[in-house]
Image (cartoon, grey):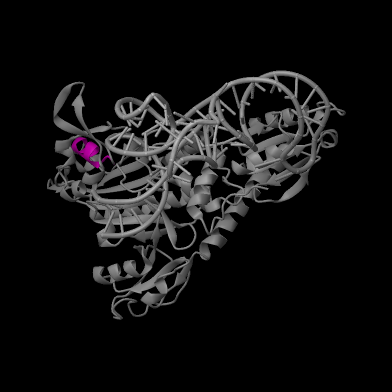
Amino acid sequence: MAELPDKAEHFIDWYLEAVEVAGLTDKRYPVKGMNVWTPYGFQARRLLDGLMIRGIEASGSQAVEFPTLIPQTEFQKEKEHVKGFDAEVYWVTRGGATELDIPLVLRPTSETAMYPIFSIWIRSHKDLPLNVYQIVNTFRYETKMTRPFLRIREIHFFEEHTCQATDEAAAARCRSNLVTFQGIADALGLPFVANRRPEWDKFPGAYYSIALDLPVGGARTLQLGTIHHYRENFSRPYEIRYEDLSGEVKYVHQTTFGLSERLVGATVAFHGDRRGVVFPTSIAPFQVVIVPIISQTLGPVALDAARALAERLRARGVRVRVDDSEDRPGAKYYLWESRGVPLRIEIGPREAAAGTVTAVSRLGEKKSLGPGPLDELILQALADFDKALSAQAHATFRKCFSVAYRLEELKNSTTVRLVSWCGTEECGHQIEQAIEGAVLGVPEGPLPIDPGAPAECIACGKTQDTRWALAGRPL
RNA sequence: GGGUCUGUGGGGUAGCUUGGUCCAUCCUUCGGGGUUCGGGACUCCGAGACGCCAGUUCAAAUCUGGCCAGACCCA
């Protein structure tokens, strides 16, 4: 039986092939870092969009849409931001044959598109808070190698931008975003750590950045998204001001929250196995696939039963597909397993007569359901699947971390490491050199494992002001 | 940013060193027929490729250059 490459040993090979066999994208589009979404992959992405939309709107954000092109003059207003993105933006310099007076940037992110308009929208404290988001495509000219979903040049980007009256309100919005993300991650069965990125690695223009990191085997990590507190760094150059109750003119404090289709890649990367993708029911294009076992001698009873069951499940809101193709049953099992369908239902002729089915979970559990209310039993089996997937993920997650006490231990790390760190950039860089990766930052909230109190800094040995930080190798 | 290597049907490959054997190999895929159908079926018939553009040559998948795309290494 053909299996995928070993996930632990050859992660990238495994990942590329898992995406390939699942048919989520077509990588043959002839522009680097830009893939075509297939109907199957697009459905997963659209369901993910739904999770993000429901989550953010529940926290009081409204959808907007700003243009794709940004004039150079606006793009360059915030110094750090420009420096951070200058090397990776696409420029539009011509309209037809005419050279544009002011070149246009294809948005790499939308701060500089939105904020000139925010400065018009916001006049008074009554206009605050302003919480808006958009889901649009953004463009970044990645110079490194690209990977489907993980590192791409056209990014399907979710970005929330908010304006708050005070520093404290902005910090509160960041915490609220973290709660929203927790909900999305739970729906995907993905554990994560929220790390406050070190100064040298924060978003260009941010006061601080909180990154949502997922360990994906070895010391490798994947940044799932980010939450940034900008303070007044953008509102000053873009003159986003309001009059407070006493008539004093103040600059707003801004935040952003960014996610992308990388979450589809993360789901593949974290849950996938030797047979391919494993989707949680929340974004599985098909939650259930029914395979009728055709028999020449016993007639089409199994197929009829499969179609009838599918109708009942659809009425209950289940995304279900009957695979009535000519392939043999075994071939269908392999196909839908590689594509990540949570639950397979097999109906044979004798089962059709008895009113029972065989249910096989993508995690391997096989059992007979019925006779009885099959739709109820299948809904239960789907809920059980999500629970089992999440439990398995959290068990894996805990094994992804270990403490390192000396710099030399970092070299061939097989997990993400917790290190005691004094917080200085100099020691941070020593840690990064030792692990051949990055200091991910200091976790917000509880640590993924409990290492006790931080001791002396792993690099300089000082004991004052040390804290636990995570170090790993971002993909 | 600097360097090394690669590009053959829809996917994966053989052929390239030494130009002619190639109207290009094998597996898979796709269309049609038949027998099948509880873990990747068998069989018969058919379809489909030398990344693009130039150059060298009697002759180019094969050699040279440029471009495009991809992989890897270094900063």
Residue A127 spot, x, y in % from top left:
24, 39
Residue at the location (48% across, 50% down)?
A185
Q: Identify the residue shown where x is 50% and y is 50%.
A: A13
A87 to the left or right of A139: left
Quarter occupied by residue A86: top left
Instruction: Specify whether A164 is left or right of A363.
Output: left
Q: Nearer the viewer, residue A434 or A116?
A: A434
Q: Nearer the viewer, residue A64 or A140?
A: A140
Residue A344 percent coordinates (x, y): 69, 41
- Image coordinates of residue A376 in percent, x first then y, are 70, 40
The magenta region covers A109-118
Q: Is residue A211 visible?
A: yes
Determine which quarter of the picture holds residue A130.
top left
Which residue sits at x=79%, y=31%?
A294
The front one of A402 and A314 is A402
In this rendering, would B36 be left or right of A93? Answer: right
Provide the major secondary structure of the magenta segment.
helix
Can you say whether B12 is above or below A434 in the image?
above
Snapshot quadrant of residue A18: top right
Total numbered circles: 0
